[in-house]
Image (tube, rainbow, N blue to C red):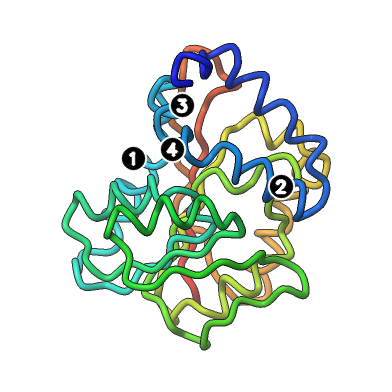
Amino acid sequence: MADYWTKERIVEHISTLKDTNTHEKLGQFFDDWAPHYDKAMESMEYVGPSIASICLQKYVKSKDARIFDVASGTGLAGECLANSGYTNIDAIDGSVASIEVARKKNIYKNLYVQWIGGDNKMDVENDSYDAIIIVGAFAFNHLKSDVFPDLIRVTKPGGYIVNNLRARWLKLEASYADGKLEADMEKHEKEGKWKLVERHVKEEKNSEQNVVTFIHQVC
């Protein structure tokens, strides 16, 4: 089965995300992929989790800081944090199979299965976390900007939200395109909810593979 997930097949599989326009379809997409996801990302030399972890470490020094891995998938970002010494990490994702893969890594204190965004508020108290890390959760039919208020709500004042994605999604996903996603970020900044402290770009040979990381501090 491992040989099945060639780079070409992975690219083809990701292209079907545009058809996963319900939580049920998106959940099935990742439930089917969960047992093979880590190896597939390794073969694609996916650097998103490590970049997000490095960015978070720049601002969150305490290894005991309470961190929320949002849209955690199988826990690749959590692994990077755990390998860097962070010990107080929770995870949330809508894919049951992905959460079960993440659970077996024994890096999370609490794991939640829940779809978030819009009216789907996280079952988490206000001001719970010192930082949130989000990796690859903004793509076709993934998170939208309507999740921002809830992310801000569960982050402590002064805490950080580290969010990275492939640059191509800023063009390909209609709800992000033409600057819409960043305009929504700026809207919350103008309202005094958070402030952008860094916009980091990891450039690749193919600019479509660039990884953009937004780091906001909650006000």
Please report contact status of discs 4 and 1: CB closer than 8 Å, yes or no: yes
Using a 10 Å C-alpha cutoff, classify the residue at mark 1 as few (fewer than 14 neighbours), some (14 to 19) or many (20 or more): some
Observer-nearest residue: 219 or 57? 57
Residue at x 56%, y 57% (from the top left corner): 96
Q: Quadrant of residue 103?
A: bottom left
Instruction: Give the residue type that dot 2 points to.
Output: Leu
Say which residue label 4 marks.
Answer: 48
- For the residue labelled by badge 4, is the local secondary structure a helix, a strand or a loop? helix
Instruction: Name the N-terminal-most of marks 3 and 4.
Output: 3
Q: From the viewer's perspective, is residue 12 above or below residue 192?
A: above
The span from disc 4 to disc 2 (Cα, nearest Å) is 20 Å
Residue 145 x, y percent position in the rendering: 71, 59
Instruction: Give the residue type that dot 4 points to.
Output: Gly
Instruction: Name the N-terminal-most of marks 1 and 3.
Output: 3
Horizontal placement of 123 versus 162: left or right?
right
Please report contact status of discs 2 and 1: CB closer than 8 Å, yes or no: no
Using a 10 Å C-alpha cutoff, classify the residue at mark 2 as few (fewer than 14 neighbours), some (14 to 19) or many (20 or more): some
Say which residue label 3 marks.
Answer: 40
Say which residue label 2 marks.
Answer: 26
Instruction: Give the residue type that dot 1 points to.
Output: Ser
Say which residue label 1 marks.
Answer: 50
Residue at x 21%, y 66% (from the top left corner): 87
Instruction: Name the N-terminal-most of marks 2 and 3.
Output: 2
The span from disc 1 to disc 3 (Cα, nearest Å) is 16 Å
